[in-house]
Structure formats: structure tokens, C-alpha cells
Image (cartoon, rainbow, N blue to C red):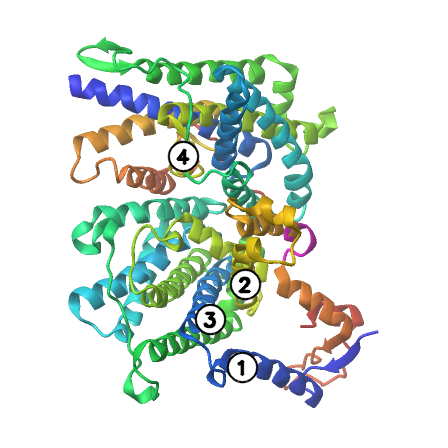
Amino acid sequence: MERFLQYLFDGISQGSIYALLALGLVIIYRGSGHLNFAQGEMAMISAFLAWWYADLGLSPWLAVLVSAASAFVVAMAIERFVIRPIGQRSPFAVVVAAIGLFLGFNALAPFAWKVTIPEAFEALFPNKADDFVRIGGAEWRDQYIGVLAVLLITSAVLYVIFQRTKFGLAMRAVASNPESSPLVGIRTGQVLAVSWGLAAAVGAIGGAMVASLRGNVDASMMFTIFFAATAAATLGGYDSLFGAVFGGLVLGVFENMMAGYQPDLIGQELKGVVSLLVILVVLLIRPSGLFGSQRVERV
Amino acid sequence: MPVRVGYGTPAHWALRALGVLVVAYLALSPMFRDLTPSEFGELTDIAVLALAALSLNLLIGFTGQISIGHSAFFGIGAYTLAILVADHGWSPGWTYPVAAVVCFVVGVLVGIPALRLKGLYLALVTLALAQIFPALVRKLEDLTGGSQGIGGLSYDAPGWTGLESGRQGRSEWMYWLALGTLAVSYLLVRNLVRSRVGRAMVAVRDNSTAAAVMGVHVAFTKTVVFGLSAALAGLAGCTFALRQTQTTPENVYLTILGAIVFLVIMVVGGAGSLMGPVVGAVVYYRVDQLSRELPDKSWLPESFRDFLVGRPNLATLVFAILLILLMFVAPFGLVGLAKRIGRRLVLVIPRAPTAAPDAPLEPTEVPAEAAEVEAL
């Protein structure tokens, strides 16, 4: 039981990070149907920004918020000046452009800051040896609880934006019917740009959480996490915000249980195989994911 | 006003022959030049990258299916060769077909769930594959040697080639092997693309619903092409393992960044054009090489050289920006751009369609606009 709870707590914190990244993927996919392959690298570069701002003298949490705001602005510009004009050509071109962004951001971090080894990142939560809550014999570390809290707060803010504001209504309208929404006076372009901004800001928070848990920033820190986030979004359904959070948490817990109970077969090294299996099974059984809507294509 | 050349006329054949001669000269010229082993090594690397990009072009350029995981097939090819050579004492040459078959089977198995569906699912699954391949190699230590990898791979030039033994002969043999694999794969892809299957592939790419209506078995076509593409990537991996004399999971071409490099080469060269991957590989390799040497170049301003010191990845950054810019100005890459310029100089007028034998023969005139589209 103690072991079970321990795997559960660790899984939830890992899953919270997957969920933050998956939320960003879903926000962009809902609006435009684009899968943003650069989501992970955008989160990575935002974490570098937070590290840099903190280095310049901002307090750690303020640095995270400012990096999220910077990510918001940059991502809006990327949508407006790169993705939208290219998207008018072909969906394939958008994928290539997103891969270009992936490659560019990945190369930019070491290039801009001259770092080739991981740089220390100040922890955002209490992280001493005895900073944990004991529940049923298992230790739930404060920083893990903190990451979950950040996920819940972010989800709540997104819920309010999407369900309680006029702009959220416009975003939902564009998601459900992109052709008709301009007819009722919605500025589709603006909505899409803000979707990218929101996604990048949520990703920046996710990136900062990863950096805080690792204790450092590194150009390759988001590879595995981004890939797990795509599995989480596939599981939850690519157009469901709730699905992204649910999928992220479930994947995190499932992966940790598999790694914990099958240390020889899977272990920490092969956690990724669990994600691949989740993607394959979902695609075989229910391609739209648990909470996604089935799309019908007209010819 | 471009020069107009009719398809199949002597002038057209002369142009084509000239093109083939130029390419053949460039590929075979190392035979007449005294190159050092490291220069042969560079050419081998270019041929390997070109083959990897060619395999992606078959999949992306001609069939419209996106893979961001070809590094995994590249790696499976490399490891198949390494295991058979190091543990079972095979001659490297015989491992090539085995590696191709292994990659084909893995490709088909992975492709089946993803390729039934439309959209980016294949990209997702291949991304996952690229991500877990190095981890899997480390885990299966008994078979793959774990993080240490498998070393001591070499392929001495067989006697019939007449190449000298030792490092010089080996490096030359590596180049001919890489070039031969590339040439055979190129011809295979070229003939495939021009066949009935090739037309089905292009139909799937341009409009899979319409293709299905016209009787193309979409899922079957996509799956077989994915398997073939994986097999070609595996062949590239074989030569790469021999060139490196070892395989380790740390090698960048066996990780997701490798898969992205292959994609960059393919897109920069020209998606959907046969020569694209080769052009892309040469450009990528030489620019990457140049960027590493930049801080030592005396013709650059001092301040710029100082700026570059300690900053890695300049070439990667340049290619990332180039990739995005190309999507604006030339979505079909450098070869696509060259074709567009070439069309202003020489216009090939396609042969007028001939009627079925028993129908009355009538002279047909090809409208100029249609000819422009068909040209090249």
C-alpha cells in the first residue's frame, strides 16, 4: 500500500507536467488543427528565459511569470508572421515550419547563452530533505504537491478564460466552426494568435516546473516530456482541455506504476515505451481519444 | 522567352544525356582524383545522408506521410549490421539485405495502426519511436552492448575491386559502397514513382479520399511505402555503422535530432523531387562543415569571429531559419527553385497525347498553359 501510494504521488507530479504541456498542444490544435511540434522546445526556451531573468535579479517566481508573458508575446508573433501565412499554403508546410521552430529553438538556447552543460536553476518550491507530507507511510514531497497545485491553478484560470469570458466564447466558437465564426463578427486571426500565446504561456509554466524539479536548465530537457505530452493529448483527445489534464495525470501515474512494479522489464529507462503503447492502443481502439469529439469529414 | 524543346526530340535527349553525364562525373570523379581517406569519409557521409533523406522523400515527398522518426530505422539498420558482424561473424555485405528486411517489417508493424488514419498520427507514432529507440538500445544490453555500443566494425575492400588494403583502400571502398547503395535506391525510387504504384502514392498524397474513390487501396499503399522507406533508411544506417566503425546509442543520428536532420536535408533539397535529397545532403554537409570552421576564417571581421567563439549550433540555427523561409519562397526546396528558374530558360513541351489505336487519329494541339505545367 505504501509502495502504491508512493508511485501514485510520484506519478501525479510527473503527470502534472505532461498535462501542462498537453494543455498547450490542445489549445493550439482546437483552434487551427495544427499540431505544434515546437511546443516542448518553446517551453524549454521559456525556462531558459526564466533562468536568465532570475540571473538578472528578478525573484524566481516573478521571473517565471515574466518568462510566461514573454512566451505569450513571441508565440503570438510566430502565429501571425510564420504559421498563418504558411498555413494558407498547405498543412504539410506548417508541420515543416513547426519542425524548423523545434530545431531553431533547440539550437538557440546554447547559441544565445553560450551554455553547453546544464545550468543550475533555483528551486521554486521548498526542496530540503524533510520537506514532505507523510500520507499512509508514503512521502509526498512539497515540490511535487506544488507542481500539482500549479497545474490545478493553471487549469482553473484556463477554465475561467474559456467558459466565463467573451474572448473564451470566441475561442470556443472558432474551435467548433471556423468557417461561420467570422460571419458573427469574430476576428478569427486574433483568436488564433491568442491561442498560440496562451499555449506558449502555459508551456512556459510547464517548462519552469520541469527546470525546478530537475534543478537545472538544459537544451534537451523537454524531449521526453514533450513526447509524453503528445501521448497524453492522444489519450485525452486532441480537442479536449479536460482530456489533456486527465490524460496527462493518468499517463504519469500509469507510467510510474509500470516502471515501479516492473523494474526489470520496464524500469525508469523504458518509461517511454509505455507512452508509445498508449498512443498505439488509443489509435487502434478510439482514435479521437477519451474525451475528444469524433470528426466527420465532408468530401 | 524560353527555348522550347519538344519531349523526345534529339535536343531533349541531348539535354537529358548532359544532365546524366554531369551527375555521373560528379559522383565518379573521386576515381580520378587523389583523395585522402578523410576526404573519402566526407563523401561517404554525404552519400549516407542523401540515402536517409531519399528514404524520407519517398514517404513524405511522394506519399505525403510525415515521419519524424527515421533515425530509429537508421539505427535499426546500423545495429542489425553491427550485431550480425560482431556477434555472428557475417561479412558486412550480406547484412544489408537482412537489415532492409528487418526495417521493412518493423516499419509495417508500426505503420499499421497509424496509417489507417488520416492526419498527423504517423508523425506522433514515429516521434515516439525515435524517442524510445536509444533507450531500448541501452536497455537490451545483452544484444546491443548497452551504452558502450558495438565496436570494431570494418569492411576491407574485397579482392575483386583491385583496391589496395589498409586505410586508403577501405575508405575508398566505403565510398563506392555508399554510392552504390544510393544509386540502386535512387533507381528503385525513380522507377517506383513512375509506376502504377507511384501514381497511387501521389494520388494518396494529393487527395486520399479521391484516391480511394478511384480504387487506390490507401492504407495498403501507405503501409507498403512506409515499410520501403524504413528499409532504405536502414540501408543508410548500415553504411553509417561501417563508416563510424561502431554503433552507440549516444550518436546524434540515432536520436530524434538525427530524424530531424534527415527531414531538413530532404526539405532543403526538395520534397517530391528525385535529385532533391542528394542536393540537400551536399548543401547540408558543406554548410555545417563551413560553420564549424568560421571562427578560424581570417576573411571574417574580428568582432564577428569573437562573437562566434563558444557558440555552437550556428549551422543548425541557419538551417532552421532556412527551413521556415523556404516554406515561404520555395516549398519544393532548392531543386524546386532551380526547376522554376530553368523553366524560364528551357521549356520542354510534352508529347501530344496519342489516341487509342482504333479511334480516328486527329492532330492534337497542346495548349501553351498546359505545357507550362507539365514541363520538367
Q: Quadrant of residue B4?
A: bottom right
The residue tagged with tag 4: helix, strand or loop?
Answer: loop
Q: Chain of mark 2?
A: B
Mark 4: few/some/many CA within 10 Å (<14, 14-19, 20+):
some
Q: Determine the residue positioned at 78% across, 68% down.
A: B369
User: Do labels 3 and 4 touch, CB within 8 Å?
Assistant: no
- Give the mark toward the camera: 3 or 4: 4
The residue tagged with tag 3: helix, strand or loop?
Answer: helix
- The residue that mark 3 highlights is B43
The residue tagged with tag 2: helix, strand or loop?
Answer: helix
Q: Chain of mark 3?
A: B
Which three-letter amino acid code belongs to the residue tagged 3? Leu
Which three-letter amino acid code belongs to the residue tagged 2? Arg
Residue in front for this viewpoint, B69 or B201? B69
* Residues drawn in magenta: B326-331
Which three-letter amino acid code belongs to the residue tagged 1? Ala
Q: Determine the residue positioned at 37% across, 75% down.
A: B171
Question: Can you tell which mark lies on residue A118?
Answer: 4
Q: Are marks 2 and 4 on the same chain?
A: no
**Distance between the alpha carbons at the discs numbered 1 and 4:** 47 Å
x, y percent for residue B78: 31, 62
- The residue that mark 2 highlights is B286
Q: Chain of mark 4?
A: A
x, y percent for residue A76: 64, 30
Which three-letter amino acid code belongs to the residue tagged 4? Pro
* The N terminus of chain A: image quadrant: top left
Query: Going by the image, does B16 lie left or right of A223?
Result: right
**Distance between the alpha carbons at the discs numbered 3 and 4:** 34 Å
Residue in front for this viewpoint, B55 or A250? B55
